[in-house]
Amino acid sequence: MIELTGNNLTVEQLKRICIHFEQIAISSKTMERVQESRVAVDRIVANKEIVYGITTGFGKFSDVRIDTKDVEDLQLHLIRSHACGIGKPFEETIARAMMVLRLNALVKGYSGVRPVLVEQLVKLVNQRIHPVIPSQGSLGASGDLAPLAHLALVMIGEGKVFDMTGKPTDAASVLAEKGIKPIVLQAKEGLALINGTQAMTAVGVINYIEAEKLAYDSEWIAGLTMEGLQAIIDAFHPAVHEARGYPQQTNVARRMTDWLEGSRLITKQGDKRVQDAYSLRCIPQVHGATWQALDYVKEKLEVEANAATDNPLIFKGGKLVISGGNFHGQPIALAMDFLKIAIAELANISERRVERLVNPQLNDLSPFLSAEPGLQSGAMIMQYAAASLVSENKTLAHPASVDSIPSSANQEDHVSMGTIASRHAREIIHNTRHVLSIECICALQAVESKGIENMAVQLKAKYHEYRNIVPTISKDRIFSTDIEAVASHLRLQNDSMGTLTLEKT
């Protein structure tokens, strides 16, 4: 069981909670902070103080005073009116991450919610009751209003949740079945639930987990390609990379050397050629730069996972209540745009390696790795498909964060588009996984022609693992099936706890 404190939640812990369904708990000490901030809200309401979102309307209605008798209705209207998400729902894993992240923000003790609301969220997470949250409709400031409103709906017994088969069903019936009483929101609580960056951050965290694994997978897949093309190992010599000074680049070169250890297919400078093309020779430089971006992204995600992104924030037992802008998603918007570019580059360089594997002008393999060149097309259109995905990535990689559009009668006149950046990063990760799957299939075919008995030990193990997924290309077939099978295998391994122990150093 993982204890949430609002201060030290990590990506690794989020993986355990959201992918491996570890349970969560809140300590009594943490609950004391929650209760302290709630007392402050109750005092503000009792004293009829003018405080945004507690005794006033929202957004452009911030100047409208709300009578004490209408405070509960104010919060209910807020959730219902803001639940206007559009499009395909986020995956359950992402919905779960949103709940955990919102909960971790609330227990920091700056939001003014009651302990009973925190306890309700804990129950939903631990009993795997996950809201159905449409993925479109957020500007990323004032936070992820629309997506988080759909999360909040479930807490009040409205909206929909995923059933055991992954299909949407009414939240009210599931809560009744589990014996969970819907919450009646009180002052500040609706606002506390929807003001924040938890949609973009939840997508970002799951993106990072998958992107990190893709980056590792890209290395052994590139290693297979190097064996299939009898590439030159000298370019990975540690002296080359230490001379430049980037630790991520040096680490990629070292891991590539480890994968290729003992290979009798790899060549030395001058054996077959003096140097390789950049897509082989510059693997440490290009992949290493992606790791630099991943390190940056992880740092920002972990800061945001432990951030108070509510508004207003309650300090010093209610003596200081400030309406600020921590809900603005710019830090995550920029991080997700960076992630988009970094992962798109893994696809770019992978597709160029695919070209080197299939183009008879660039290798000594069978043209397009065909069993009968001319009669059978072999991998010709696999490269075509990879090129299509790479070009699509280039469009998706355009930064969302450079855009903004005013809303709420120009009160919210600059927005982050962080959730759009996160969603587009997710599409790029999906596309890149398929490009790497195509490289894997082509590389498996190439090493066969060179002699698998001459392969590096670790890569030979990968060869046998993936030959159980996709058979040798002895004749043309529906290669879409093979690509999807490899991509699914690459992704399913995210369910293995083993990836948590991987080190980059």
Image (cartoon, rainbow, N blue to C red):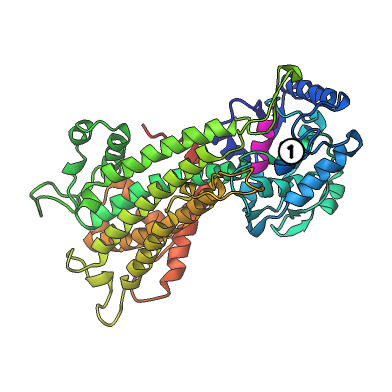
Q: Residues within 10 Å of mark 1 (few under 14, many from 20)?
A: some
The reply, left or right, for residue 76 in relation to residue 433 is: right
Looking at this rendering, what residue extends furthest in the left direction? 270
Q: Residue 138, how many percent across, how many down?
A: 62, 50
Q: Main secondary structure of the magenta part?
A: helix
Residue with the most extreme right position = 69
Q: Is residue 194 visible?
A: yes
Instruction: Indicate yes or no whether the magenta region holds residue 106.
Output: yes
210 in magenta: no
Q: Which residues are magenta?
A: 98-107
The residue type indicated by label 1 comes to Ser
Q: Quadrant of the C terminus?
A: top left
Kindly indicate the quadrant of the structure image that contains residue 124.
top right
Residue carrying label 1: 62
Residue closest to the eye, 217 or 241: 241
Where residue 479 sits, quadrant-wise, is bottom left
In the rendered image, residue 214, in percent from the top left (x then y), is placed at: 42, 48
Tell me residue 283's x, y (percent): 27, 46
Residue 147 in the figure: left or right of residue 493: right
33 left or right of 353 in image = right
